[in-house]
Each structure stands twice: as C-alpha cells, then as structure tokens.
C-alpha cells in the first residue's frame, strides 16, 4: 500500500498517510496517459482559424485580358489562387478539435497520473493551507517553507476560497484546483503535487472504483445481470 509524508508548516516530514492502492497504486499505462493529454490539449484549441478562399475575396469579376492574342497565359480572374491577393487554396476553416474519450478511460488515466507522482516522490500532503490576508507574498512564504519554490506545482485544496484564489493569481509556477477539476495534464506537468487532508479524501473518493453494493449483489440461485443504469459520475 503506497504511503506519502505529511508536511508540517515548516516543511518537515511527520506522520505518513496510507493511500488506497486501487487509486494511487495502479499500473502506469503510458499510451493511455498520452491519449488523455492529447485529448485535453486538443479540447483547449479554439478552432477559430479561418482563411478566405477564391469565392470569399472581393473583386475579380472581369477577365483580366482576352483569352488569345496577348502572348500571356490565360487568366479568368485576378482573385484566383495564383494571384497576389487572391484566395488561399485549401486554407484552414473554423472547426472543433474536441476528441471523445470514455469516462472510464478518463478516470483510469487520472489514477495513473496521480500514481506516477506518488511513485516518483512528487506527491505530498499538508494539513491545511490558510491565507487569511489573501496576499501573494504570504502564500509564497508558506510554500517556500514547504520546500516549494520555482518548480511547477499543483495544489489541490478541498475548497477554493477567495483568499487562496487571489493569492495564487500572480504565481506563475503554481496551479490551484479542487479535486473535481484536477486534470491529467495538470498532474503530469507539475513536478510537485500537494494536497490538503480534506482534498486528499475527496480526490480518493472521486477516483475510487465503484464498489458493488448489497442491492447489486445477485440473489441465491439467480444469475448476475448488469444494473439497468449507472450514475453518470461512474
């Protein structure tokens, strides 16, 4: 069963927390992580690129010169693709770059990403992080005491209040998220992942495999059938 240290306010390692092996100790499948990261980065693309084709460029309704007798190549319009200022052939058009990935694969990829951070020692737990004044200097001072400075860091908190959000706004190497919004790309990009205790419990509950309840258990002498419907979160 994997364990992670609990850091105090001065960054010293105290007690350890045992993690659920079904969530934080799964097999690290690199192709699945690559597919999840590719999907996430593709979904971030706006897809608003556009170019004007021959029919979108104004002008050029008259033939530049007559078809024969000039010694020059025949031309039909000054807005043809070979002319300067003409239309662009096969140019980009607005489109969506969204990619589909089943929910089960997304959840498994996030488990693998967190397990990779636990395996390389980049995952740690703190009791809580309180920034009462909401100032960036106070937050950076507390993070420096924890040994976090300059390297990409993901801070997972149970609740993102206004003070922490405002204090972390101007820290370029820090990302603050709640367990429900943590993504595979954020976990893999960050060199250090830090969770508070409440956020760790919420993250473990969100990534836990759906267990079979008493209602789902088959009765004696009857074959087991899959449930009629499942929760959308599963």
Image: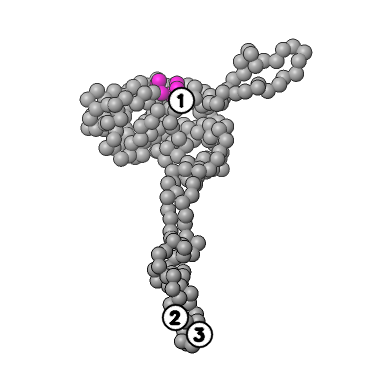
Neighbours of disc 2 within 10 Å: few (<14), some (14-19), many (20+): some
Q: Circle 2 is placed at which residue position?
A: 65
* Numbered range of the magenta stretch: 197-202
- Quarter of the figure with residue 27: top right
Residue 51 vs residue 101, the one in the foreground: 51
Rendered location of residue 188, percent (x, y): 45, 39
| Cα distance in 3D space between marks 2 and 3 | 9 Å
- Quarter of the figure with residue 65: bottom left
Q: Circle 1 is placed at which residue position?
A: 203
Whichever of labels 1 and 2 marks the residue nearer the N terminus, that label is 2
| Cα distance in 3D space between marks 1 and 2 | 71 Å
Neighbours of disc 3 within 10 Å: few (<14), some (14-19), many (20+): few
Q: Circle 3 is placed at which residue position?
A: 68
Rendered location of residue 112, percent (x, y): 52, 34
For the rendered model, the colour scheme is one colour
Whichever of labels 1 and 3 marks the residue nearer the N terminus, that label is 3
Where disc 2 sits, the SS reads loop
Q: Is residue 86 magenta?
A: no
Residue at 33 percent of width and 36 percent of height: 174
Where disc 1 sits, the SS reads helix
């Amino acid at each position: 069963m994997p364990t992670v240290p609990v850091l105090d306010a001065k960054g010293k390692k105290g007690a350890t927390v045992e993690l659920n092996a079904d969530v934080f100790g799964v097999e690290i499948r690199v192709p699945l992580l690559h597919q999840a990261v590719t999907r996430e980065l593709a979904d971030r693309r706006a897809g608003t690129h556009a170019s004007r084709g021959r029919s979108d460029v104004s002008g050029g309704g008259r033939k530049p010169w007559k078809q024969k007798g000039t010694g020059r190549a025949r031309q039909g319009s000054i807005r043809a693709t070979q002319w300067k200022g003409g239309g662009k052939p096969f140019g980009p058009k607005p489109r969506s770059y969204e990619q589909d990935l089943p929910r089960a694969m997304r959840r498994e990829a996030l488990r693998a990403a967190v397990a990779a951070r636990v395996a390389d020692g980049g995952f740690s737990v703190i009791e809580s992080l309180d920034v009462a004044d909401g100032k960036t200097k106070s937050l950076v001072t507390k993070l420096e005491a924890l040994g976090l400075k300059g390297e990409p860091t993901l801070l997972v908190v149970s609740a993102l209040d206004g003070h922490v959000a405002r204090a972390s706004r101007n820290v370029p190497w820090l990302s603050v998220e709640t367990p429900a919004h943590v993504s595979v790309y954020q976990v893999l990009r960050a060199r250090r992942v830090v969770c508070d205790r409440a956020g760790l419990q919420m993250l473990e509950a969100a990534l836990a495999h759906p267990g079979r309840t008493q209602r789902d258990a088959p009765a004696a002498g009857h074959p087991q059938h899959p449930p009629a419907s499942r929760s959308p979160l599963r």
